[in-house]
Amino acid sequence: MGWGIGGGMGEDRGPGVNGVLLLNRLLLAGCFLPVAIGRLSNISGLAAALTLKGMPYGDVVATLIVLAEVFGPLALIVGVAPRLSASVLIAALVVTTGTQHRFWDYAGLNRQAEQAVFLSHLGVLAALLFYALVGPGAWSWQGWWRGLNGKAKPAKGKKKQPSRPRAPKPRPAPARPAAEDEELADVA
């Protein structure tokens, strides 16, 4: 299954491209982990903030966001499940950005600060979409697991035996036209 840009997932794209993809994963993880650690120590504060902004089931949503923001960056660093980890982080980012950084509700300096955070979150969203599209590269768990050139590593164990040739299936006799049946009936 190819990823589109720069060749298929796990292909040897060269050390320059794989280095950039690794740096992208590390920088994206760095955007989430510090905030996630802070939220992990105060999930109830995030739940209260979400509830005050009108989010239903704020405590459940806060717990899911914290789980996504802790385990998603770890999956980014290792390079495992790129589409799933990017999708989960995108969902968490959309919820937190849409509820916590509604700059259009403010005026003055608060509006400028919230707008700056909102726009920076859009940049992180773009990077996550790029990661979901391109994949983690060869310098990742997924790249190592699939091996070079996108081929899966063979399973250890018995070698597959070639199947024995099968006898051809018998073909049904061709149907005779109805006219021949009538001629044979007249002869009898």
Image (tube, rainbow, N blue to C red):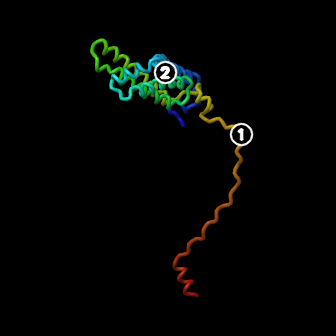
Say whether residue 80 is left or right of residue 161. left
Q: Quadrant of the N terminus?
A: top right
Expressed as whole percent of the image width and height from the top left, the position of residue 30 reads 49, 18
Pick the residue in front: 44 or 94: 44
Expressed as whole percent of the image width and height from the top left, the position of residue 145 reads 62, 31
Residue 148 visible to the viewer: no
Q: Measure the alpha-carbon separation of dots 2 and 1.
A: 39 Å
Secondary structure at numbered mark 1: loop
Q: Residue at x 67, y 38 (%)?
A: 155
Q: Residue at x 31, y 19 (%)?
A: 103
Q: Residue furthest top?
A: 109
Secondary structure at numbered mark 2: helix
Say whether residue 182 is left or right of residue 93. right
Name the amino acid type tagged 2.
Leu
Q: Residue at x 28, y 17 (%)?
A: 106
Expressed as whole percent of the image width and height from the top left, the position of residue 172 reads 60, 68
Pick the residue in front: 66 or 160: 66
Expressed as whole percent of the image width and height from the top left, the position of residue 154 reads 66, 37
- Say which residue label 1 marks: 157
Name the amino acid type tagged 1.
Gly
Report crowding for label 2: few under 14, some 14 to 19, many 20 or more residues within 10 A (C-alpha).
Answer: many
Q: In the drawing, what numbered circle is on residue 147?
A: none
- Say which residue label 2 marks: 28
Which quarter of the picture shows residue 116?
A: top left
Pick the residue in front: 86 or 70: 70
Q: Quadrant of the C terminus?
A: bottom right
Q: Residue at x 48, y 28 (%)?
A: 86
Disc tally is: 2
Residue 168 visible to the viewer: yes
Mark 2 or 1 closer to N-term?
A: 2
